[in-house]
Amino acid sequence: MGSRFLHPDPRRSGGVTAGSGQQHRVRGRSCPRASALGVSAAQWPKLCARPPREKALDTGLSTCRARWGGGTVSGMRPGTRDEPGADARPPEAARAPGNTAAEPRILSIDRLRGVLVILMVGGDHLAGVEVVPAFLKHAPDIGLTIADTVAPAFVFVIGLNYGPSFARRMRRGTAPAVRHFVVRYLALIGIGAIIAAGATTFAAQPTDWGVLQAIGVAGLICLPAIRLPAWARFGVGLLVLWGYQVALDAFMLPSVLHSVQGGLFGALSWGALLLMSTAVADVWRSGLRPYGICCALLVVAATIAAVLVPVSKVRVSLSYVLVTLAISALVFLAFDLASRVVAQRPGFFCWWGENALALYVLHLVILAIVVVPPVAWWYVGAPYWLAAAQLAVILAVLSAVAWWAHRRGIRMDL
């Protein structure tokens, strides 16, 4: 029954087989369902009169083909009860390392990445304005604010795509894949160094380190372990994090406190965060229920760590990494669930998420224009309305660039 339905006998269907691409007509009108299933116009009424089980199969195939662009049943990820797939992950075949098909973009990841870039832009702008309340700025040392959760969440999102991106590159061989990732993250370190030099020269903010350098070093730390199983990657990340905390408490604290993002040594902690994020990403891809359990375990681990070790972004402490990892996983869970019920087409936040790196670098250039003028009332001493107006202009310009890049099909992923 199933084979006769998928590949009709040419003798009974006028010589037309499935996938012929011909447009059949029923009573003078085109019949797209008949054409899609590869049956003749004369046979279509007979197929419509089949038993309910065959009708259900017809409906299921039509729905799957509409969702996945005509893929076969074996090429689609089987649905599960806890994954009502509006924004479900792509087919297993598309994610397999040996498959040459490009993996479709996952809107929930793009949306979260876009929101995070917007928050980073707003946080960087408001950080130097005196009237902005302290809870919207980074904590000076021990403590956790809203602003302190954005950068680790961004690293978490990088971890969501790190493994699949490496697997796609592996189709061309291990050496090209490793070379591509090394060049990518060395480029991030170089871009970060240029930005740090610009901040020192023009903005009177002496620094030799920044968030892009921290991400670049973290990406290089993660690379040797990316082919390990998820549990092993998470374990290695925990070991690196524990070793970092021991060294921090023993002799590295003064150096880290006088650095931005923990400096070069603090990049070890950021690397541990990225490595554990790739493991959490694998759990997410295995299903919603395992991911929910994973989030609960992360909350427990973060709570214990926060009791034992001070939470500090400046120190990039063990507790800070685990707490922000748990928060990031829960926030992504909310985005994933929301993306299953909203329209499945790119929108405003996806525009930002598709070109996060370019927009982040561009915002630093625009921000320099705002910060450089040596007039107190213009930036540092700006009133609420002026600071809000400046931020609105910056976001408007960057949104226009994001929309333009989306329309042109330009994508620059981290």
Image (spheres, rainbow, N blue to C red):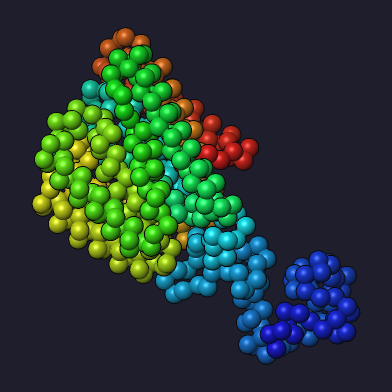
Q: Is residue 94 visible?
A: no
**Place of residue 62 in the rendered image (x, y in percent of width and height, measured from the top left):** 66, 72
> Residue 379's image quarter?
top left
Q: Position of residue 154 (x, y in %)?
A: 37, 43
**59 and 198: which one is in front?**
198
In-image side of 151 versus 410 (left or right): left
Q: Residue at x 60, y 64 (%)?
A: 67
The image shows residue 56, relative to residue 65, as above or below, that is below
Q: Is residue 29 above or below residue 120?
A: below
The quarter of the image holding the N terminus is: bottom right
Residue that appears at 42% across and 28% down: 190
Report the front residue among 200 and 90. 200
Task: Tell me if residue 49 can be seen.
Answer: yes
Q: Position of residue 408 (x, y in %)?
A: 63, 37
Residue closest to the far top: 374
The spot of residue 264 in percent (x, y) is: 28, 34
Q: Residue at x 20, y 55 (%)?
A: 302
Using residue 143 as the reference point, say whether residue 107 is left or right of it.
Answer: right
The residue positioned 32% from the left and 40% from the top of the image is 151
Question: Is 246 left, or right, of 370 in this rendering?
Answer: left
- Indicate whether 384 appears above or below 349: above
Instruction: Tell me how many marks there are.
Output: 0
